[in-house]
Image (tube, rainbow, N blue to C red):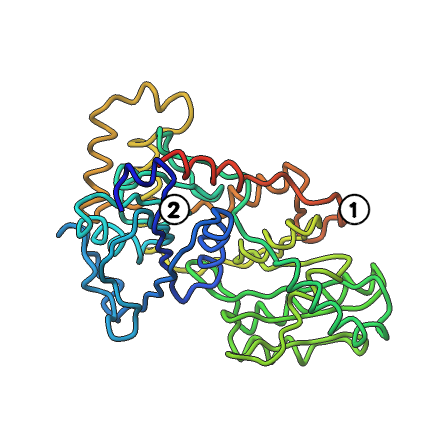
Amino acid sequence: MTDLENTMGALPPRVWVLTTAKLGDNAQVLAIANALGWPYERKHLEFTNADHVHSRAFGPSQWKLAVDRSSPLVPPWPDLLLTIGRRSSPVALEVRQWSGTRTKLVQVGQGQSRAGLACFDLVVANPQCPLPNRPNLVRLELPLLYGKSETIFAAVAQWQPRFMGLPRPWTALLIGGSGGPRILDTEVARRMIGEVNQLVTREGGSLLVTTSPRTSREAADIIEAGMPANGFFHRWVPNGQSNPYPAILGLADHFVVTGDSISMLTEVIRQGKAPAIYPLPFRKMTVRKSVRRWYRHVFRNLFPPGEAAKESGGWREGLGERLMHLGLLRYYSGFPRFYQRLIARGLAVRFGAPFLPIQGPPSDNLPMVIEQIKALF
């Protein structure tokens, strides 16, 4: 299939979607693929234990890929490849190289990515990623995460009878887990369930709780033991037969979401409800904090935001992109900045502040993203 055939509309572009074990990442690229309306192949990737070793200094590479547990990457090569996350980007770059550079690459998110923006035809940047201005960059107001309406409706029909005996309002506690610098251990879990119980006592009604894949067994045990008498607790398990999470999204009146999970926060906001963000403490890792501080300092000097970016000079941008390729610098995700923006826009509150009324879902950037991708062809 040639570019001319694509342009003439004889056949739609051949699309690959790279997915990994991260469900939140998969949901974003699949939302784009489904909205495009073009047939696509889902290529699931699994990685080896060498994933933490950086390989961009050696050019595009898939050597960290567990080939025996991943989808085959064989011709015919795609015209369009959708990817997300730092682990998939080297694979995407190699696919384009195999295609003779014909494949168009669209990178979603870019947080923690180890490839420069110039490596992709289009970058769809989530709001937690403070990236420099580029012609191929599209900025989102919220990540492309949605609770599927048909899934929510079906779950509501299944679970609502079980909740009807619980007094309203229903306050949902959506629990993530330790990740990156944030920690949710037994001490934090005990404090959190105590404070949320106090909130429910003050607001009235009942508590609906669900854990997630990142919640440790020990933390889940503490939370389950601290549940009030008139409450509902669900422990997430792999391949569980029935998950009340979609039903809770559709039914709960108020939400408390742990501050590690942008995915759960976004899905609540997409339902038109303003969650309260429960802050998780940071790990006491001086070296890690120093490294993160160094990344941010260098990044901000090489890629100044806004109007300052126009005056930074080409040498800074070139140096920054080269450092990305060598693995000496990476983009980072600014979680606190994202939370502050949600609060400033009235889409969320800090835990302890009064809940906001239901406002309806915010504007959606997905049509703009689709338009930008189709413009590549």
Q: Which residue is mark 2?
A: 12
Quarter of the figure with residue 296 = top left
Quarter of the figure with residue 231 = bottom right
Q: Which residue is mark 1?
A: 357
Left or right placement of residue 322 versus residue 165 in this view = left
Q: Earlier in the sequence, mark 2 or mark 1?
A: 2
Residue 187 place in picture, x, y as percent: 57, 71
Residue that appears at 66% across and 49% down = 350
Residue 300 place in picture, x, y as percent: 35, 34
Evaluate whether residue 324 shows in this view.
yes
Residue 2 place in picture, x, y as percent: 25, 42
- Give the structural element (helix, strand or loop) at label 2: loop
Vertical placement of residue 274 versus 376, above or below? below
Name the amino acid, label 1: Pro
Question: Which quadrant is home to the C terminus?
Answer: top left
Residue that appears at 23% across and 43% down = 102
Q: Residue furthest top?
A: 311
Residue 216 or residue 30, whichever sits in front: 30
Residue 68 place in picture, x, y as percent: 25, 75
Q: CA distance from mark 2 to mark 1?
A: 44 Å
- Give the structural element (helix, strand or loop) at label 1: loop
Quarter of the figure with residue 255 = bottom right
Disc number for residue 262: none
